[in-house]
Image (cartoon, rainbow, N blue to C red):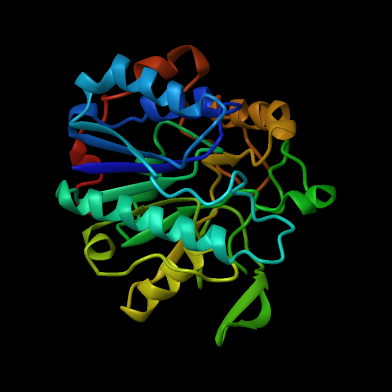
Amino acid sequence: MLAVTSLVKNRVWILPYFLNCLYNLAYPREATSVILLDDASTDGSRELLDEFRVAHAREYRHLLIMDNPNPVGTNTSSRGMKNRYPIYRNLARLRNRVLRKACELECKWQFSVDTDILFVPDVLQQLGQHHLPYVSTIIINDATALDRFDYDRLENRHVNFGNLEVWDGQELYVNFPYQLGRLHEVMISGACYLINEQALYSGAEYGFHHLGEDTAYCLNLRERGIGIVCDTTPKAVHVMEPRFLPDAQIAFQRLMTGALIGMENRQSSGYDLATVNAVSGILAPSTIVSL
């Protein structure tokens, strides 16, 4: 059984697109538990989640909408903040709630994906083919670096943090050099990743870290002997902010139509936009059951 998990905080600007990606995952819905946690949204996001549940709950094994009874402020963006502790601590607490719920539902895999990410229907098969405890996609992850990449070529995406730095006694790397179309073992990753039972039931949890709660989770997994791997074949687009949505949609359409993105990249799944609504459920669970 698969758990698809996400946190939601004032994402009405992209939530319809994200929920469409979720609904069109090429994995049987009757074998999928969707766990969405709303962090006290005030922009209509919670209402959109409720509409999605009413429309589709019967199709899924579970379709749960959870709430955060103790929200922290109204802005969850950490960009430019000097004190990130309250936000990252809050996010870690929420992600641990979702992680525990996936375990309570006895799921075998967890696909954790942020709600500002658009992903192709066969992302599970693309990640699952590697048979790894933890494997993430490569995504654009820094709005301050927009002068160094564009969505058309999907350059300067995020693999890991590279030049040696020390945060809270932990050695991390910033500006990690990578090649497209291959696997890289990295120190930390996040945002869009698939884990199997080994990682899911390892006891690793999210926590505060200056670089984000995902960093703490990856370090926790590594302490348990679980490697963090990133697949640098594009299969998702990180939108980040409303102003990037038009360009991100074009980039995502290119992924969906199987267009080549960069000389090193393979063609994507081959699904075209006319058939995207028909792909859900066509691949049996056995496609990733051997993770």
Place of residue 110 in the rendered image (x, y in percent of width and height, measured from the top left): 30, 49
Place of residue 219 in the rendered image (x, y in percent of width and height, measured from the top left): 44, 74
With respect to residue 135, does 215 lie above or below?
A: below
Residue at image point 18% right, 31% down: 61
Quarter occupied by residue 278 = top left
Residue at image point 56% right, 33% down: 11
Quarter occupied by residue 172 = bottom right
Residue at image point 22% right, 59% down: 197
Q: Which image quarter is the N terminus in?
A: top left
Toward the viewer: 148 or 91?
91
Q: 16 left or right of 59? A: right
Q: 140 left or right of 133? A: right
Toward the viewer: 211 or 32?
211
Q: 154 left or right of 76? A: right
With respect to residue 64, does 158 lie above or below?
A: below
Farthest residue in the bottom direction? 169
With respect to residue 76, does 257 lie above or below?
A: above
Place of residue 21 in the rendered image (x, y in percent of width and height, measured from the top left): 45, 28
Residue 219 visible in the snapshot: yes
With respect to residue 94, does 279 lie above or below?
A: above
Q: Which image quarter is the C terminus in?
A: bottom left
Quarter occupied by residue 202 = bottom left
